[in-house]
Amino acid sequence: MLTAVVPMKSIELAKGRLSTVLDGAGRRALAQKMLDHVLGVLREAGLSSVRVASGADGTGDLNADVTEAARLVQAEGATHLLLVMADLPYLSAADITALIEAGRDNAVVIAEAKDGGTNAMLLKPPTVLEFAFATHRPSATFHAESARKAGHEPVILRRPGLARDIDTPADLASLVADHPAYQVFRHVA
């Protein structure tokens, strides 16, 4: 059974690195719009078991929250975990299909972000590796090392829809220029 988990900071704290260009209400609106997009794409891709792991319910530590979510879904019977970050406005159903396909014959699939981070993973079982998001080093490399330590050669998946997250003012400016649905934020770009 495949379960998707979308980690999300508390909506009040989301997108803090954009505070120089967006006020609190703007950051909340952007975070909610991107989360809604990711959840819609997961539904479009045919996933029936999807949950949000919210920092509001957890420790506020992304790694601890994701680890707890992985343990929980595994205890509930999930054999596969599809972990997808909430700030992927370019994500498409084809990206989700590519992740799932790559995981058919591999225990660990890592979708690498443009900056070397990790924007999504497919894991079999859900607790197959140690999580290391936001550690001030490229997490995709760390996750790949962790997979190897667990005896699995990871697949690194590079797709534009999975690589382009929104972390910086420059990311937001590109999003506003590229994506009509985000034109409402053009005043900050």
Image (cartoon, grey):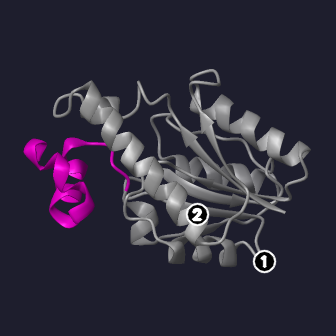
Residue 78 percent across, percent down from the top left:
85, 55
Of 160 and 180, which appears nearest the observer?
Answer: 180
Where is 167 relative to 95, above or below? above
Q: Name the residue under label 2.
A: 42
Residue 41 percent across, percent down from the top left:
51, 65
Q: Disc 2 versus disc 1: distance between alpha carbons?
A: 21 Å
Query: Which residue appears at 89% of the width and 46% of the height?
Result: 76
Q: Circle 2 sits in a helix, a strand or a loop, which is it?
A: helix
What is the magenta range? 165-189
- Kind of residue at disc 2: Leu
Q: Is the magenta stretch mostly helix, strand or loop?
A: helix
Q: Mark 1 points at which residue?
A: 105
Q: Residue 156 carries which label?
A: none
Q: Within 10 angstroms of label 2, few (less than 14), some, or many (20 or more) residues?
A: many
89 drawn magenta: no
Query: Which residue appears at 48% of the width and 48% of the height?
Result: 86
Where is 34 relative to 179, above or below? above
- Kind of residue at disc 1: Asp
The mark tally for this picture is 2
Of the two numbered discs 2 and 1 in the rendering, the one whose residue sits closer to the viewer: 2
Where is 74 relative to 79, above or below? above
Residue 29 percent across, percent down from the top left:
32, 39
For residue 14, what is the image quadrant? top left
Query: Which residue appears at 83% of the width and 56% of the height?
Result: 125
